[in-house]
Image: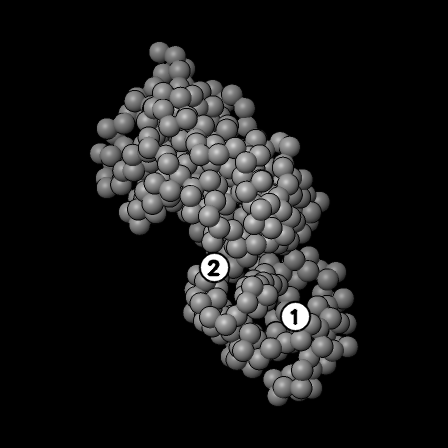
Amino acid sequence: MRLHRNLCFAVIDGLTLIFNEGNYADKVIQQLLKRDKRWGSRDRAFVAETTYDIVRWKRLYAEIAEVKAPYNRDNLWRMFAVWAILKGIKLPDWKYFENTPARKIKGRFDELSKIRKFKESIPDWMDALGEEELGKDTWTKEIAALNEQADVILRVNTLKTSKQKLQAQLNDLNIQTEVLPDYPDALKLKERSNVFTTEPFKNGHFEVQDASSQLVAEFLNVKPGMRVVDTCAGAGGKTLHIASLMENKGQIIALDIYANKLNELKRRAKRNGSHNIEPRLIESTKTIKKLYNKADRVLIDAPCSGLGVLRRNPDAKWKLQPEFIEQIKRTQQDILQQYSRMLKAGGQLVYATCSILPSENQEQVKTFLSSEVGKDFILVKDKKILAHQSGFDGFYMALLEKNKA
């Protein structure tokens, strides 16, 4: 592979914004890719994947390059050189790469690879917490899986098409997909491709949604004609899936505290042909109280640490703080206590997170069930998904049922 100066500069500019300004990697990369209209798909892939790679392995590369935050441009070029050497890429004769000690870099890599927190490039606190909650063996396997690049998974919108039809349409566009046996509406791309520019996407025939995330709506056990409340709907990935499982019959009330996310949900629902979704902004506790004892099904896709989705958000490793996890656990319990009251007697609720930590998952359910509000509920079943076992994102979901009056 030959390195091109303008592409490498784009990567360095992106890393400056992500590491020093605290910007989100996905947003920075979106902006970078608009930088030069002459870039082809290979150029764009190089910028996106190299930036993500260096973000993912920041701690390891910084340690090898012997640089510390905040990183100046020279520091970032040194980290870039480490990336290139470890990838077996020949460094061009540029001033940034003068005196790069290739043998020393490889030696340091071998040395640091014996220590998990460096090998997997994670903060000390995260390494300690993962081992404490999951045990040494499971955590070692899990964090390795969470550092792999995520596959692109599509969810077929069954309101508009079928899996077979969509597969054929994409095949005509030279986009090859494969079926995932245990995921009814999923197709996996054989090679990465920008599917958002395709006609089937513009016509609402599919959404991009990880396979683990697709199991949540299925777990909720919805039927056409029900009244369902999605309490933390966000931009509505799971809401749209629920709408297709309900065949557009019944009512889905999509709640969120962010108006911009609900606006995005409206846009997506229109494209998907989902007509039974009613977005509602949570402006006060009144919004919640009005729905007490009204819903057949309630989905609580709770805010969480996001440790199960590090493959697609590698910069979360550097943004997350242990205090945030403690705080979010209090929020999770509070949401369970409040939002569970929306359920009718005999109704069902799913509590879900994209976390792998038992303290955000099984333990939250246990705490809820032993509380005053929770004593009216039973745990029907739960599912713990780890990335190293499934090959997809880490997730947790619990199905609870409210006793009949």
At 54% from the left and 24% from the top, the residue drawn is 381
Residue 168 seen in render: yes
At 27% from the left and 41% from the top, the residue drawn is 281
At 59% from the left and 37% from the top, the residue drawn is 385
| Residue 340 vertical position relative to residue 284 in the rendered view, above or below | above
Element class at badge 2: helix
Residue 117 figure quarter: bottom right
Q: N-terminal of the two: label 2 or label 1?
A: 2
| Residue 182 vertical position relative to residue 12 in the rendered view, above or below | above
Residue 3 or residue 56, whichever sits in front: 3
Q: The residue under label 1 is which amino acid type?
A: Trp
Q: Position of residue 336 (x, y in %)?
A: 39, 32
| CB within 8 Å, label 2 to label 1 | no
Within-10-Å neighbours for mark 1: few <14, some 14–19, many 20+: many
Say which residue label 2 marks. Answer: 26
Residue 80 or residue 168, whichever sits in front: 168
Q: Position of residue 391 (x, y in %)?
A: 65, 43
Marker count (numbered): 2
- Looking at this view, name the residue that lies furthest to the front: 172
Say which residue label 1 marks. Answer: 83
| Residue 96 vertical position relative to residue 38 in the rendered view, above or below | below
Q: The residue under label 2 is which amino acid type?
A: Asp
At 69% from the left and 72% from the top, the residue drawn is 1
Q: Position of residue 90 (x, y in %)?
A: 71, 77
